[in-house]
Image: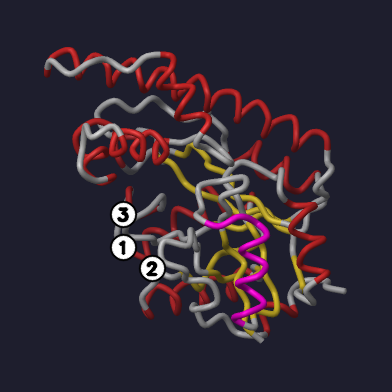
Amino acid sequence: MLIDLHIHSKSCSDGNLTVEEIVKEAKIRNIGLISITDHDSVGCQEKAMALARKNGIRYISGVELNVTFSHPRYHESKSISLDFLGYQFDVKNRELKDKLQQIAEYREERAAKILNNINAEFEKEGIEKLTKKDLREIQASVDGVLGRPHIADYLVRKGIVRTKQEAFDKYLVKCDVPKYPLYIEEASRLVRNAGGIMVFAHPNDPHGTSLVNLTKSLHEQTEIIEESILRYIDGVECWHSRNDAQTTNHYIKFAKKHGLIMIGGSDCHQKPILMGTVKVPEYVAEQFNLE
């Protein structure tokens, strides 16, 4: 059975396919177990569960939470971002939904502040400033959760930059505003109180939100987890589209040592479509109480 427990939708996050299209694609690809894990959003979970059931695909509720983290021995104790996946929680849990709504509202405020910072750069370069109308147009282009990639897309459409990467390199990194400060203690409590499990996402992702920003040493990474993260998690993402064999083997061994659930997924944003391409062992499904 093909398994993919890390997928992002256009409907509620920064993917490129709607929930309907994801389920349809999963069926075409014969994926037997999926989870849509949108960033800081559970708004599409009920629809995803119903569609998966209708198409004979087993489904686990999912969400990806961005957490602010620091460690005294690394990065001069400065904060970095880490991602954690919540699974099998009650999608109607009021406390979790309220917190995610609060984070969504902050994202809107953050976007406006980022645009103000970009305008300061534009003023230096003699480029016409972005207006409230521009912000409304960016918001209108978003099906799910507003983020920096949507601003980058808009700068490309306006002809200010040629590519999304150029938008980040030239403006969005320099003009960034801190994300909502959700800490691991609260994130874990929210997921667990909703009846779910907390999983550390892609801990060694070389191009993403991961412990690589503190250390590239796998041994040091797992020391950090043991010291500061282990008590807040129930599992770790061992299989990921950007893992090499060494990373996967290291984290399988680590998970077994600590009795952690092991999950895997493509982290598919459908650019290109990676769903079902990561070889996740069938025993991963057996760790969950599935119907």
Q: Are marks 3 and 1 in contact (CB under 8 Å)?
A: yes
What crowding class fits label 3: few (fewer than 14 Cα within 10 Å), some (14-19), or many (20 or more)?
some
Q: Is residue 58 above or below residue 204?
A: below
Q: Is residue 40 above or below residue 291?
A: above
* 117 displayed left or right of 283: left
Type of the residue with mark 3: Thr
* Residue drawn at point x = 39 percent, y = 71 percent: 243
Does the magenta run of residues contain 28?
Answer: yes
* 195 displayed left or right of 238: right
> Residue 269: image x %, image y %?
48, 58
Marking on residue 6: none
Q: Quadrant of the N terminus?
A: bottom right
Label 2 to label 1: alpha-carbon separation: 16 Å
> Residue 285: image x %, image y %?
71, 78
Does the magenta run of residues contain 257?
Answer: no
Label 3 to label 2: alpha-carbon separation: 17 Å
- The residue to which callout 2 is attached is 242
Type of the residue with mark 2: Arg
Magenta segment range?
A: 17-29
Which is more toward the observer, 69 or 32? 32
- The residue to which callout 1 is attached is 217
Front: mark 3 or 2: 2
Q: Secondary structure at mark 1?
A: loop
Which is more toward the observer, 262 or 269? 269
- The residue to which callout 3 is attached is 215
> Residue 106: image x %, image y %?
55, 23
